[in-house]
Image (cartoon, helix red, strand yellow):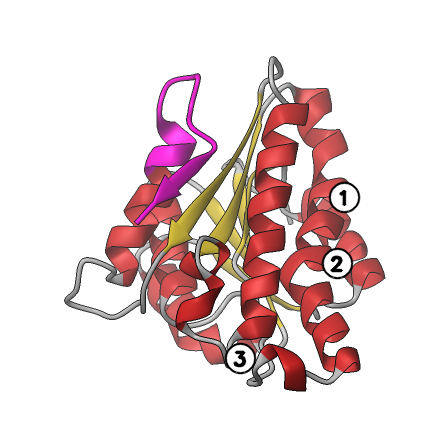
Amino acid sequence: MSTTRPVALIIGMGPGLSAALAQRFAAGGYAIAGFARSPEKSAGLAAEMAESGQKLDLRAVDAGDFIAIGSAVRAVEAQLGPIEVLIYNAYSATPAVPSQIPLDALVADFRVNVGGALAAVQAALPAMQARGKGTVLLTGGGLALDPTGWLPAASLAIGKAGIRNLAQSLHKEMDGTAIRVGTVTVTGQILPGTPLAPETIAERFWDLHAMPAPAPVEVIL
């Protein structure tokens, strides 16, 4: 079933920031598609949004499965409509200091933290380029700026450094085109009622998408 509204696709759908992103972009006129390993965790949000005339289409997708991500992105394009905004908010972390991270776990985390983002971008980008319109937003983290403050999160720090690098290189590649690429780097714990409340961060994502060109590649909170 198609929709007359453009689609904002959120990969890593769940409570917290992803829920706030879904609500903010829905308020901005977008139909929302959400990918998650456990989409049932967002069923209540989907029902709540439906009551107010907003759409949240939930799909079970593993962000570490590149083939599945590509297929799911193309399915959204075919079934829901054009993906105008792609938001990658998925992550995986294995608690361990650098010298103790199992290498297989580090690689598995990196597949989700960075590889899945690139797989999604590569699947969505051709249609964005053909339409001459699109935004790619990647959720960054303060561990990309300083990985030493929380050593047991080493695998996540490596992933956030990778996602920041990916955002910057994609931004440079898309320079001079109609495709906007950016990252919102969150430098602390996301908690309601604080300067890093989910709704506050979601508003920065919206600003990065909606502000007149040229937009910065990174917003640091």
- Spot the residue most to the top: 176
Q: Quadrant of residue 167?
A: top right
Q: In the image, is 173 to the left or to the right of 164?
A: right
User: Disc 3 and disc 2: Cα gap in Å?
Assistant: 18 Å
Q: Which secondary structure lies at badge 2?
A: helix
- Distance from label 3 to label 1 (Cα)? 25 Å
Q: Are marks 3 and 2 in contact (CB under 8 Å)?
A: no
Counting residues from the N terminus, which is met first, the one under dot 3 or under dot 2? 3
Residue 58 visible in the displayed image: no
Mark 3 residue element: helix
Mark 3 residue type: Glu
Q: Is residue 125 left or right of residue 17?
A: right
Q: Is residue 50 above or below residue 217?
A: below
- How far from the left and from the top, in percent, is residue 185? 41, 50
Say if mark 2 contacts mark 1, CB within 8 Å. yes
Residue placed under numbered mark 1 in the picture: 123
Q: Which mark is residue 169?
A: none
**Amino acid type, mark 2:** Ile
Between residue 9 and residue 200, name the one nearer to us: 200
60 magenta-colored: no
What percent of the width, then of the height, locates residue 137?
51, 43
For marks 2 and 1 on the same chain, the one whose residue lies earlier in the sequence: 2
Instruction: Pinpoint residue 109: horizontal percent, then vertical percent.
Output: 68, 72
- Which residue position holds label 2? 69
At x 54%, y 65%, the residue is 157
> Magenta span covers which residues?
207-221
Question: Mark 3 or mark 1, which is nearer to you?
Answer: 1
Circle nearer the N terminus (3, 1)? 3
In the rendered structure, the answer to whether residue 143 lies left or right of residue 111 reads left
Marks 2 and 1, how far apart at CA: 8 Å
The three-letter amino acid code for the residue at tag 1 is Ala
Q: Which mark is residue 40?
A: 3
